[in-house]
Amino acid sequence: MIDQPVLSKAVYLSLVVPCYDEETALPQFYADAIGICESINKPFELIFIDDGSKDATLKILRQIAHNDIRVHYISFSRNFGKEAAMLAGLQAAQGTYTVVLDADGQDPPALIPQMLEAVASGEYDCAGTRRVNRTGEPPVRSFFARCFYRIMRKFTDIAIVDGARDFRLMNKRYMDALLTLPERNRFSKGIFPWIGFNTKWFEYENIARTAGSTKWSFWKLVMYSLDGMAAFSSKPIAIVSVLGMVLFMVALAIIVFIIIRKLAYGDPVAGWTSTICIILFCSGIQLFTIGILGQYIAKTYTETKQRPHFIIREAQ
């Protein structure tokens, strides 16, 4: 756990903000977030997590924290990923209510008062957000994103809402439950609904980044999706097991057919090309299933090493 800073009075609201190469977006985000938090008229804190940025992000955070005692930052020794950054911020947060949001402007801070009102009423433990469209995203990326949510709903027993963001506000009960999950292979989009509790959803149109460019390449998103499926479902293993049995039965039927044809007609089965195609097909299926099994073995290996989620270089 992270050593928590000592504040003069109890914190009502904590904002946890993961950052990776966000030097161009930070000034505007800080101004927007401070304005919203001050309008709530309650003690608050901003916790920025520098996830091993290579630009001037840390320098800007140092300056902001020097000028504003309500701002704290945690800087990692290298890039550990957004999941580790969110966990570090959540562990450090002292607020009665905690918000997680990105610094790139795609998570509008203007929604925070409404989210806070919903959770503070006691009817809900968490306020989540979801985008109702993907305007501005490449069509291919949007298509695969929608496919991902459909697959996750079919392959897992958790309800992952299409378009759900990591931007959410949580009360203390929700936070305490969240921090009891120690796994190294974290997939927050699955962890949040797995915890349960009552969640109120806020919808908004997709918002373009205020500055900079996304750090999530298509390949990184694919790998993140695979991590999520491996973390919350064992159905892929069941599917490849069934597929293996089906292929075995097909192969057995073909063998019987070949034997009968040989005995009946006395000529071997011709077709070198078709034979090679079948061999390549079965080999591909085998490699595919081994890859799926390898994903689960790799996750198990990572968990058993018990390495820390992150290493802190400096904090204030």
Image (spheres, grey):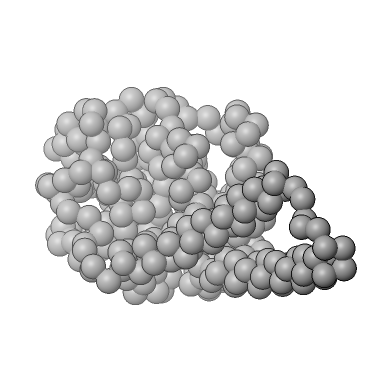
Where is residue 32? Give x, y as percent: 40, 35
In depth, the one of 292 and 139 nearer the eye is: 292
Where is residue 31? Give x, y as percent: 35, 33
Residue at (40%, 35%) from the top-left corner? 215
Residue found at the far right of this picture: 264
**Quarter-wise, where is residue 181 in the image?**
bottom left
In depth, the one of 121 and 134 nearer the eye is: 134
Q: Left or right of 3: which side holds 193?
A: right
In depth, the one of 233 and 271 nearer the eye is: 271
Question: Does the image show residue 60?
Answer: no
Residue at (17%, 54%) from the top-left corner? 311
Q: Left or right of 34: which side holds 77?
A: left
305, above or below 208, in the image = below
Residue at (77%, 50%) from the top-left corner? 270
**Quarter-wise, where is residue 169 in the image?**
bottom left
301, above or below 313, in the image = below
Where is residue 186? Give x, y as percent: 39, 61
Where is residue 203? Give x, y as percent: 62, 48
Residue at (48%, 61%) from the top-left corner? 290
Q: Left or right of 128: which side holds 249?
A: right
Question: Does the image show residue 141?
Answer: yes
